[in-house]
């Protein structure tokens, strides 16, 4: 009898081990499939990303941070700004939020920026942030209250439930009245309309169409600049250390940008491979051959020699 019980327990133990191995194998297979999906099908996943979780806490928290630490001279009702934002989004379907729907929200957060500090950019985001960090007087759209509050967030509503859709939001290209696009379009227009004095534009000379008429800068900000308020448009074209060197002040789409500025009566300057921008790239990659050449040039210019 005891022998029979012993054999029975042994059989049950083997079954448990088999089930456990099967579960582990299934889990590993699921992880591998998930990894492959993430690695090879990122665009499909991005299209399914819904509203950023905890978006209210993030947006309102950023508002309080901005008005308390970043720019304490400002006085805004952060809860009211959120209410106006929420009302603009959740009462419409995910592809039916226009610029006009954000009218009350923007009215609740007016902001004036000092002249000579406006920095515009296109396809140079990482370098732009480094440049703005070095020259701390520069203002980018991300430095404004609306830019600070909504940067890198996703949102859309669902008309049926009158709430945010946390499971799936369309990509910008899916519809003209995308809730995220409409907000950034109005924010970009406001920022450009306020630009005054000498402004700076950073463009990527290592890509085709460094100046793209369909980009936010090309389609919204450029047309919103006022030649009566802007003294000079200073274009800086920067190429990656490894190249390619595709466009410059005298080649490619930058020439089209200059022609548009001239036709609208703007004064302008254009610089290829600004030294400061090259140094900022070299800080990240100091061993690059271009950086060694740049360092030697600076040493010679200052009458110094390396040991």
Image (cartoon, rainbow, N blue to C red):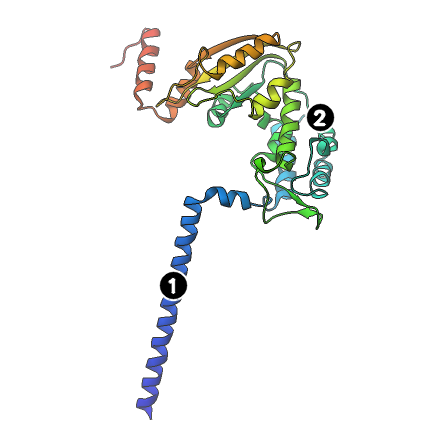
The answer for how far apart the CA atoms under marks 2 and 1 are is 56 Å
As drawn, is 172 to the left or to the right of 3?
right
Question: Picture coordinates of residue 238 (x, y %)?
Answer: 44, 18
Q: Nearer the viewer, residue 231 or 219?
A: 219
Q: Which residue is mark 1?
A: 24
Q: Which residue is mark 2?
A: 110
Question: Picture coordinates of residue 196 (x, y %)?
Answer: 63, 13
Identify the residue shown where x is 61% and y is 30%.
Answer: 147
Q: Is residue 48 above or below residue 196?
A: below
Q: Nearer the viewer, residue 117 or 8?
A: 8
Identify the residue shown where x is 67% and y is 25%.
Answer: 73
Task: Tell me which corner region of the image, top left, top right, bottom left or bottom right, holds residue 98.
Answer: top right
Q: Nearer the viewer, residue 1 or 213?
A: 213
Report the quarter where the C terminus lies: top left
Identify the residue shown where x is 65% and y is 42%.
Answer: 94
Identify the residue shown where x is 32% and y is 85%.
Answer: 7
Pointer 2 local density, CA inside 10 Å: few below 14, some 14–19, many at least 20: few
Q: Are marks 2 and 1 in contact (CB under 8 Å)?
A: no
Residue 140 seen in render: no
Q: Is residue 139 above or below residue 47?
A: above
As helix, strand or loop, the secondary structure at mark 1 comes to helix
Q: Is residue 306 above or below residue 110?
A: above
Question: Picture coordinates of residue 121 (x, y %)?
Answer: 53, 22
As drawn, is 124 to the left or to the right of 150?
left
As helix, strand or loop, the secondary structure at mark 2 comes to loop
């Amino acid at each position: 009898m005891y022998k029979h019980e012993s054999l029975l327990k042994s059989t049950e133990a083997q079954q448990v081990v088999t089930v456990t191995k099967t579960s582990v194998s299934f889990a590993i297979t699921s992880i591998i499939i998930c990894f492959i999906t993430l690695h090879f099908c990122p665009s499909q996943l991005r299209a399914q990303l819904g509203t950023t979780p905890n978006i209210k806490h993030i947006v309102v928290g950023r508002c309080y941070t901005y008005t308390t630490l970043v720019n304490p001279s400002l006085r805004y009702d952060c809860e009211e700004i959120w209410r106006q934002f929420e009302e603009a989004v959740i009462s419409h379907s995910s592809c039916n939020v226009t610029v006009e729907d954000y009218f009350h929200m923007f009215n609740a957060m007016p902001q004036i920026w000092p002249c000579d500090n406006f920095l515009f950019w296109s396809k140079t985001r990482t370098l732009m942030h480094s440049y703005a960090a070095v020259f701390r007087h520069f203002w980018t759209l991300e430095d404004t209250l609306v830019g600070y509050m909504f940067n890198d967030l996703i949102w859309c509503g669902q008309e049926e439930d009158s709430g945010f859709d946390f499971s799936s939001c369309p990509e910008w290209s899916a519809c003209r009245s995308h809730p995220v696009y409409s907000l950034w379009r109005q924010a970009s227009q406001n920022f450009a309309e306020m630009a005054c004095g000498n402004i700076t534009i950073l463009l990527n000379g290592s890509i085709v169409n460094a100046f793209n008429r369909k980009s936010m800068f090309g389609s919204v900000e450029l047309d919103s600049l006022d030649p009566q308020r802007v003294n000079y448009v200073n274009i800086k074209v920067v190429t990656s250390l490894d190249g390619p060197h595709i466009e410059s002040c005298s080649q490619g789409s930058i020439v089209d940008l200059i022609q548009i500025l001239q036709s609208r009566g703007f004064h302008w300057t254009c610089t290829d491979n600004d030294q400061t921008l090259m140094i900022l790239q070299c800080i990240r990659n100091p061993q690059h051959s271009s950086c060694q050449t740049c360092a030697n040039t600076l040493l010679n210019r200052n009458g110094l020699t390396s040991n």
